[in-house]
């Protein structure tokens, strides 16, 4: 695990493996960390893979301001600057996808491609916003444990819960280590995020969209919001919201195939 101090005073922790000419940056989801990507990274040795902990998650620092998608994207831009990253393939899972779109909206010139993994450009609807508020109240009143123990089973396809006990426990451990205040501030940021469908639909970069056919959090229809010759859609069968743990090999193949396809064109 490495750490770097950014110009805005925050500290970003990150993992880095591989030394390929092409760089992939992977952003985890809410109450996740860079550890989500360890298995996937081991299957992509031909790339340089960097996985940061988002603000207030994992070993990265946080503060009391709302963790809006714009704030998290600015953290990422400063991270790119500090590591002198250019022509990056940026892929974000869930919350990480929201940050990916906010980054692509402002800094597309730093990207070779980008993608959403179990994520969506759409904003929260009324019911989803109310559920964010309930989650905030749950964390403020009871801490992370009851919230995480209720959340994690919903992240996996129902058929995978009994078969993937190791992966489920990993997600719980990572979630329980999340700073409660950071979780609350991130929930507020996700609740209030804007619609970025036009970023997806108007982008001129190659785009990878990965969804699970058993995702109980973000159904495939909310991920597949763009198409065209520069867009690749991948539906992982028997997979919930955690494809990097539930279908690691298939996801690695999808990413490798996508980058290879557009690198040749």
Image (cartoon, helix red, strand yellow):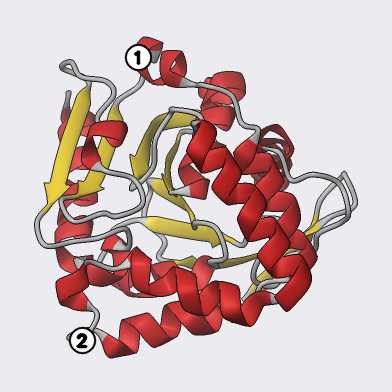
- Assign the C terminus to one quadrant of the image: top left
Crowdedness of circle 2 by 10 Å Cα count: few (<14), some, many (20+)? few
Task: Choose the circle earlier in sequence order: 1 or 2.
Answer: 2
In this picture, residue 28 sits left or right of residue 59:
left
Number of numbered discs? 2
Judge whether residue 85 can be spotted in this image. no
- Image location of residue 26, percent across then percent down: 46, 53
Relative to 18, say whether 124 is above or below.
Answer: above
- Assign the N terminus to one quadrant of the image: bottom right
Label 1 vs label 2: CA separation? 38 Å
- Image location of residue 207, percent across then percent down: 30, 29
Q: Residue at x 39, y 15 (%)?
A: 203
Q: Nearer the viewer, residue 197 or 192?
A: 192
Q: Quadrant of residue 20?
A: bottom left
In this picture, residue 174 sits left or right of residue 236:
right
* Rendered image: mark on residue 201: 1
Relative to 60, say whether 29 is above or below.
Answer: above
Q: Nearer the viewer, residue 110 or 177?
A: 177
- Image location of residue 253, percent across then percent down: 15, 55
Q: Residue at x 46, y 17 (%)?
A: 199
In this picture, residue 91 sits left or right of residue 138:
left
Judge whether residue 47 can be spotted in this image. yes
Crowdedness of circle 1 by 10 Å Cα count: few (<14), some, many (20+)? some
* Rendered image: mark on residue 178: none
Q: Residue at x 67, y 66 (%)?
A: 138
- Image location of residue 68, percent across then percent down: 71, 38
Report the mark closest to the observer, 1 or 2: 2
Q: Check disc 2 and report the residue beneath it.
A: 162
Q: Nearer the viewer, residue 230 or 243?
A: 243
């Amino acid at each position: 695990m490495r750490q770097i101090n950014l110009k805005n005073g925050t500290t970003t922790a990150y993992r880095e493996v591989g030394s390929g000419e092409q760089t992939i940056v992977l952003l985890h989801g809410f109450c996740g960390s860079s550890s989500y990507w360890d298995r996937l990274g081991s299957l992509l040795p031909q790339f340089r893979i960097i996985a940061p902990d988002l603000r207030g998650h994992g070993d990265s620092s946080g503060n009391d301001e709302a963790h809006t998608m714009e704030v998290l994207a600015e953290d990422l831009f400063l991270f790119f600057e500090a590591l002198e990253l250019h022509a990056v393939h940026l892929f974000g899972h869930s919350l990480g996808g929201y940050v990916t779109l906010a980054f692509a909206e402002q800094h597309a010139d730093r990207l070779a491609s980008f993608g959403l993994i179990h994520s969506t450009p759409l904003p929260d609807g009324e019911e989803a916003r109310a559920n964010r508020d309930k989650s905030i109240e749950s964390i403020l009143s009871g801490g992370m444990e009851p919230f995480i123990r209720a959340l994690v089973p919903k992240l996996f396809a129902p058929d995978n819960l009994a078969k993937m006990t190791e992966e489920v426990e990993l997600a719980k451990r990572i979630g329980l280590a999340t700073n409660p205040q950071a979780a609350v501030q991130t929930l507020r940021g996700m609740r209030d995020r804007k619609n970025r469908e036009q970023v997806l639909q108007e982008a001129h970069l190659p785009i990878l969209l990965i969804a699970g056919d058993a995702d109980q959090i973000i159904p495939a229809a909310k991920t597949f919001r763009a198409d065209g010759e520069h867009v690749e859609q991948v539906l992982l069968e028997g997979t919930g919201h955690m494809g990097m743990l539930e279908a690691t090999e298939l996801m690695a193949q999808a990413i490798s195939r996508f980058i290879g396809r557009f690198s040749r064109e």
